[in-house]
């Protein structure tokens, strides 16, 4: 009867999507074909958690659950497949028939989400709505998201959770990154930069959106620069700052990291040129920074041994 109802699931080839999804599917399909449905179901759950909107894993998980006699739960995952699959897919009618058989065998039993999953999902939603996305030590919504995955939660709404979480993490990052109105650059210590790095790592892990991942990559260059400066790696910081400035033209303050790093390694002429370039930008966009720019220019000139020019600039800044 099984041979009539279900065709044996074959291994799915890699198709250029997330490798971890492919690997999970291969492991799961191999277990399924050996009749180890419990192991197969765990790996299908892992695949769903990696790519919550890809239909195949829901279909295969439903079949594994059917053969484990958990019919009401199988119905839920058949339904997920039917919602997500291409309506023109060749197996749609077959899956509908399988779903009907599972429903008839469930004797009207309705599957209820396990309590640990329900509680973890509700707690995660609360943190997302409160804007607590990532705290020191990996707390906040991020920690609850990881907890939710550990419960075996595997539903299409994980995509929506990830969008909210990744956007929230980036918003937190940007909020802490921007300098105050009277500051040339963000005033972050090493611990705060490391926290910023963790936020970007978390956002990278939950987002598959190319635009979001591009932002993460660009902002990561700033974090690397900030950490290099605070760990006395001025040579590296100068190189990283040049990359960060090029990658983040929307954040003008990044130029100051390059200026600081170049000054630290005694590359005074390039530092002075960078100050002059920033001054041209600030003339219209940040006029309040012009007095600070004069002071910084004077300090660099002083280090270059041009004491008279430096004194004149200091006096001009004071006026």
Image (cartoon, rainbow, N blue to C red):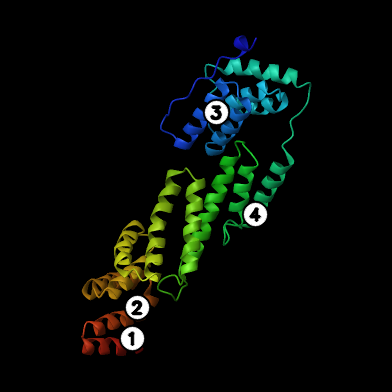
Q: Which residue bears the numbered disc 3?
A: 28
Q: Which mark is residue 127?
A: 4
Q: Secondary structure at mark 1?
A: helix
Of badges 2 and 3, nearer the viewer stands 3
Of badges 1 and 3, nearer the viewer stands 3
Cα distance in 3D space between marks 2 and 3: 63 Å
Residue at 60 percent of width and 21 percent of height: 35
Q: Which residue bears the numbered disc 1?
A: 317
Cα distance in 3D space between marks 1 and 3: 69 Å
Q: Secondary structure at mark 2?
A: helix
Q: Secondary structure at mark 4?
A: helix
Cα distance in 3D space between marks 4 and 3: 33 Å
Q: Position of residue 225 (x, y in %)?
A: 37, 64
Crowding at mark 4 (Cα within 10 Å: few <14, some 14-19, many 20+)? some
Q: Which mark is first along the chain, 3 or 1?
A: 3
Q: Which mark is residue 290?
A: 2
Cα distance in 3D space between marks 2 and 1: 9 Å
The answer to whether residue 271 shows anywhere in this view is yes
């Amino acid at each position: 009867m099984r041979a009539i109802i279900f065709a044996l699931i074959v291994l799915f080839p890699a198709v250029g999507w997330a490798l971890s999804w492919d690997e999970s599917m291969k492991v799961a399909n191999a277990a399924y074909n050996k009749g180890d449905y419990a192991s197969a179901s765990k790996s299908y759950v892992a695949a769903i958690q990696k790519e919550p909107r890809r239909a195949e894993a829901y279909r295969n998980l439903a079949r594994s659950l059917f053969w484990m006699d958990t019919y009401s739960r199988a119905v839920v995952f058949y339904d997920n497949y039917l919602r997500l699959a291409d309506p023109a897919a060749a197996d749609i009618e077959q899956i509908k028939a399988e779903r009907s058989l599972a429903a008839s065998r469930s004797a009207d039993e309705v599957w209820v989400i396990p309590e640990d999953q329900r509680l973890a999902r509700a707690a995660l939603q609360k943190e997302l709505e409160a804007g607590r996305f990532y705290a020191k030590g990996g707390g906040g919504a991020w920690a609850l998201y990881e907890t939710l995955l550990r419960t075996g939660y595997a539903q299409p709404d994980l995509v929506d959770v990830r969008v909210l979480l990744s956007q929230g993490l980036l918003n937190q990052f940007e909020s802490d990154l921007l300098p105050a109105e009277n500051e040339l650059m963000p005033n972050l210590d090493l611990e705060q930069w490391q926290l910023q790095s963790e936020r970007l790592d978390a956002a990278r892990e939950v987002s598959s959106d190319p635009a979001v991942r591009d932002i993460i990559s660009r902002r990561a260059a700033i974090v690397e620069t900030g950490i290099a400066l605070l760990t006395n790696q001025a040579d590296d910081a100068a190189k990283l700052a040049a990359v960060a400035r090029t990658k983040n033209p929307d954040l003008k303050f990044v130029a100051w990291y390059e200026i600081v790093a170049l000054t630290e390694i005694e590359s005074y002429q390039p530092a002075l040129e960078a100050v002059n370039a920033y001054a041209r930008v600030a003339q219209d966009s940040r006029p309040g920074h012009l007095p600070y720019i004069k002071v910084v220019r004077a300090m660099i000139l002083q280090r270059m041994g041009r004491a008279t020019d430096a004194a004149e600039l200091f006096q001009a800044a004071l006026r």
